[in-house]
Amino acid sequence: MSTLLAHIAISDGKVKRSSLEVLSHLRQQADEHGHSVAAVIIDPDADSYTGEVQKYGPSTIYTISDSIFENHRNTPLLRALNKVIDEVDPYLFAFASTEGTKDILGALAANQQAAVLSDVSAFELTGNGITATRPVMAAKILSENEAEGDRILVSVRSGSYELQEQDTDAEVIALDFSMEESDIKAKLKEIIGTSGDKIDLSEAETIVAAGRGAKDEEGQELIQELASTLNAGIGASRALTEAGVIDPSLQIGQTGKVVSPQLYIAVGISGAIQHVAGMANSKVIVAINKDPDAPIFDIADYGIVGDLYKVLPPFIEELRKIKS
Amino acid sequence: MKFYVCIKQVPDVNAPIQIKNGELIQDTDRMILNAYDASAVEEALVLTEEHGGEVEVVLVGPDKATETIRKALAMGADKATHIRTSGDEAYDSASYAHILATFFQDKEYDIISCGKQSQDTDAGLTGGMLAEHLDLPYATNAVGLSIEDSKLIVKRQGDTGQEMIALPTPSLVTCSNDMNEPRIPSLKGIMQSKRKPVESVEIADLDVEENKLKSKTKVTGYREKPEREAGQKFEGEPEEIAQKVAQLLDEEANVV
Ligand SMILES: Cc1cc2nc3c(=O)[nH]c(=O)nc-3n(C[C@H](O)[C@H](O)[C@H](O)COP(=O)(O)OP(=O)(O)OC[C@H]3O[C@@H](n4cnc5c(N)ncnc54)[C@H](O)[C@@H]3O)c2cc1C
Ligand SMILES: Nc1ncnc2c1ncn2[C@@H]1O[C@H](COP(=O)(O)O)[C@@H](O)[C@H]1O
């Protein structure tokens, strides 16, 4: 019996859903193959999240609580992750594919001489490793992969697995950790524009995404109105984050985030493959575009061909009626 | 400052692709400089134009990848090293990171920059691996770079906000394409690139430990993504079609 370990990411004081998706899948894989499941939380206040994490079936939860983890920084995080690996000796260590994970995964794999597959959309244990599916070529196609060895790291795209509750009485083990600020050569000077109360796109049920077609003030107002009507998160194509119209952390696509909401409304977005790479797994896609040949219509469940300035006001009004 | 930029030749994701018996069939004439690496080259050029210094590009790849090196030289890089492979090896990010780490062992530099990911595989691993091998402080997913007091100031895109990080030298940074528009080589740049030095190194001469080159991961095949069917498309009176779709979202799709 080996240990499968899930990393639990905390963001804005909340456990990331995508981490619990990974944990749920590990539980299922462990049951199938006769392994045990552990989770690790690294945060200034790690112990306050064990209750929630416990619901998804780990038998052990390791915590590392230290104020050094107030903000994401790769040096202390790597030190902590290496320590956890030394302690737990997991056969498989799985992460949600957040920017935080992307920042450390390569370095951690190199340090551990582990086999690593990043950003997979599915994986299964085999006798001597894992098989995994990865979207490649700007997510136009899927590659099948194998990783072998006695230490395997994997990061998983958000929305790849359903949450599955399985309450356990997990043992909580707090690990010692200490690190001096002076050991950190990369100095974090400042953080600009944290999302605060904004909706986390990787977890949003509904997303309204704005493209170049909705670049001006009137377009942005309409997008805001539509989003607040649906209680949706706002996302954007690169055209708008590049132009400085929308916060760069809201870019969706190959360079930006991968999202998988129930409803995705693309407004004034052409549907370039690099954008589609980040949103093609949405359950229902609505596209509003004045060009009937825009590629976004090839993947939209509901396509509205028209000028967004004329389409959105009655669309918002009708949705308001439905909502009330 | 001495910049080394690691550049990779990748297939153009916009070119048509076919899958036959699980194998990927691509037009080998459509190989390009990885877009994220083009941004890394651009940024190194801007910083050395401003603060002085030199930009050298390093590429691990087959003979055919020379054209990609020429592209970076035509943009303005000063020189290049081409670490030659046969092109038949099934290298993964870890293999490339080992090769590059071996190359950098006895080199002097201030900054090594990489792309944040390969455009074709989106792996995003090589930069962090290389930093670990060389024991360098690093930052990934940079969307802006500047130099202040001989430190590299990196603006990186994190999960929610942007983090400003000061890196001492030597250090490593991986670049997003969200930091600049890479310049298009001018005719003069293209002419000059032909006279710029390209050092050629055979993989065998680098003495990379054999067992480190062996990939722990492999691609066993490719398949089509389950096709997403185009659904209903509505044209006509804006008010009418907008209302219609709103109602369908409620009654048919059940998502509002
Ligand atoms: C390596 C790489 C990575 C990339 N990563 C990303 C990424 O992560 N995310 C991303 O989005 N892009 C990414 N891109 C860029 C991508 O290729 C496109 O350039 C970008 O998505 C285009 O944004 P857009 O659809 O808003 O703009 P455009 O392509 O200019 O489309 C605007 C659309 O709006 C429509 N329109 C205009 N006016 C109106 C109106 N009044 N009413 C209705 N419709 C209107 C037009 O018909 C058009 O279809 C990447 C590119 C590269 C090379
Ligand atoms: N063969 C290579 N030659 C030079 N640099 C490379 C090579 N492979 C990867 N890199 C660097 O690593 C980055 C991509 O890492 P990855 O996504 O892991 O493939 C690229 O943007 C390059 O900067």
Image: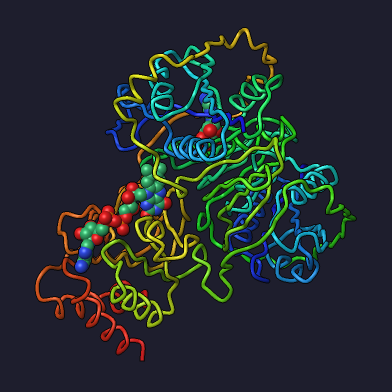
Tell me: residue A140, above or below residue A10.
above
Q: Is residue B250 visible?
A: yes
Q: Give the total of numbered labels.
A: 0
Q: Residue furthest left?
A: B236
Residue closest to the eye, A122 or B201: B201
Residue drawn at 62 percent across, 21 percent down: B99
- Taking depth in this image into account, of B123 and B7 the one nearest to the observer is B7
Tell me the residue at 70%/15% (across/down).
Answer: B209
Q: Position of residue A46 (x, y in %)?
A: 78, 65
Give the color scheme: rainbow, by chain, secondary structure or one colour.
Answer: rainbow
Is residue A215 placed above or below B214 in the rendered structure? below
Viewer-nearest residue: A200 or B127: B127
Q: In the shown orientation, is residue B119 left or right of residue B19?
A: right
Q: Position of residue A105 (x, y in %)?
A: 65, 43
Drawn side of residue A61 relative to residue A247, left or right: right
Q: Residue at x 50, y 20 (%)?
A: B79
**Which residue appears farthest toward the bottom when viewing the image?**
A324
Q: Position of residue B207 (x, y in %)?
A: 67, 11
In the image, is B13 to the left or to the right of B110? Answer: left
Q: Is residue A277 visible?
A: no
Residue A315 place in picture, x, y as percent: 25, 80
* Image quarter (top left, top right, bottom left or bottom right) of the N terminus of chain A: top right
Q: Quadrant of residue A167?
A: bottom right
Name the image quarter holding the C terminus of chain A: bottom left
Vertical placement of residue B110 versus A172, above or below: above
Residue name at image x 45 percent, y 70 percent: A205
Q: Is residue B242 left or right of residue A65?
A: left
Tell me the quarter of the picture where residue A290 sits: bottom left
